[in-house]
Image: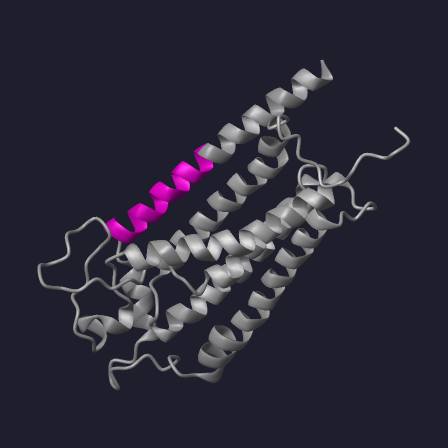
């Protein structure tokens, strides 16, 4: 009975997550295509008198946020990958299953979240605010569901690439899920807030619109969830492979 109740809870949680992802995607799509929130926020960051974004070359936005913080987060992500690979090669016998799963999720997220967002960005036609005629650039403003005018080059600006350097940190919540759900949700929320703040600094520079950052956050949440399910459920079901980085004791 206990096993059945756990399965029912897991199924409900899955469908709630899936429903939430669909609704949030529709909300972001609505904001970008049927409101002027993107333009209003970019207008507020733009100085019409000088025809510039005053924060574009500010130290905190250009050097700290875009260079220093990104470097720190890249080192952190690389460290997670090294630890996960080391555990796969020479398992830490004292690690519980939750820590092992958490490390794998963090390591995979550190690689896959920025990579996926970068690929989508290079495939997109959307332009950055500072490239638009409205803000002193040369390109027209076109919403996501509108056709780009003929002859206009692709902008390659959506989703927000720099925000992904922090958004993979959402995966740290895997260390507490599902045995400490409240803590996991608090950690995920804190890391999501950090990622959005990193994206917001880029918005102040004129590098992205709000929806660019929101799409990056959505993609990160979707990928981290999929990566967690793969490690916690998918690998366990591939028992033909029966993957376990901890070798069985010789006296068993």
How many badges with numbers are in the image? Answer: 0
Q: Is residue 227 left or right of residue 232?
A: left
Residue 31 highlighted magenta (yes or no): yes
Q: Quadrant of the C terminus?
A: top right
User: In the image, is residue 73 above or below residue 26?
Assistant: below
* Whole-percent x, y for residue 196 in the image: 48, 60
Name the residue at the top extreme.
1
* Whole-percent x, y for residue 1 in the image: 71, 13
Residue 54 highlighted magenta (yes or no): no
Q: Is residue 200 left or right of residue 234?
A: left
Q: Is residue 39 left or right of residue 11?
A: left
* Whole-percent x, y for residue 3 in the image: 70, 18
Name the residue at the left extreme.
150
Residue 24: name its quadrant.
top left
Q: Which residues are magenta?
A: 19-34
Residue 168: name its quadrant.
bottom right
Q: Residue at image x 33%, y 63%?
A: 209
Q: Is residue 25 left or right of residue 91?
A: left
Name the residue at the bottom extreme.
50
User: In the image, is residue 231 above or below residue 90?
Assistant: above
Residue placed most toward the observer, 247 or 110:
247
User: In the image, is residue 146 above or below residue 232?
Assistant: below
Name the residue at the right extreme.
251
Residue placed most toward the observer, 89 or 163:
89
Residue 183 visible to the viewer? no
* Whole-percent x, y for residue 65 in the image: 50, 74
């Amino acid at each position: 009975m206990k096993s059945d109740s756990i399965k029912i809870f897991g199924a409900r949680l899955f469908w709630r997550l899936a429903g939430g992802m669909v609704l949030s995607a529709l909300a972001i799509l609505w904001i970008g295509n049927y409101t002027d929130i993107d333009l209003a926020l970019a207008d507020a960051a733009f100085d019409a008198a000088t025809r510039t974004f005053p924060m574009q070359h500010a130290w905190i936005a250009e050097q700290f946020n875009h260079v220093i913080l990104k470097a720190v987060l890249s080192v952190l992500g690389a460290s997670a990958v090294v630890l996960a690979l080391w555990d796969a090669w020479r398992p830490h016998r004292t690690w519980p299953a939750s820590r092992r799963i958490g490390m794998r999720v963090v390591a995979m997220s550190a690689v896959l979240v920025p990579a996926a967002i970068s690929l989508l960005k290079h495939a997109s036609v959307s332009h950055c605010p500072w490239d638009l005629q409205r803000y002193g650039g040369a390109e027209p403003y076109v919403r996501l569901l509108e056709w780009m005018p003929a002859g206009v080059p692709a902008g390659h600006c959506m989703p927000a690439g720099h925000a992904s350097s922090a958004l993979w940190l959402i995966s740290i919540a895997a260390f507490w899920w599902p045995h400490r759900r409240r803590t996991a949700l608090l950690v995920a929320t804190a890391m999501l807030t950090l990622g959005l703040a990193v994206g917001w600094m880029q918005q102040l520079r004129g590098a992205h619109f709000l929806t660019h950052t929101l799409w990056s956050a959505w993609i990160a949440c979707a990928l981290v969830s999929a990566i967690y399910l793969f490690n916690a459920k998918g690998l366990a079901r591939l028992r033909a492979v029966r993957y376990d980085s901890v070798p069985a004791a010789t006296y068993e």
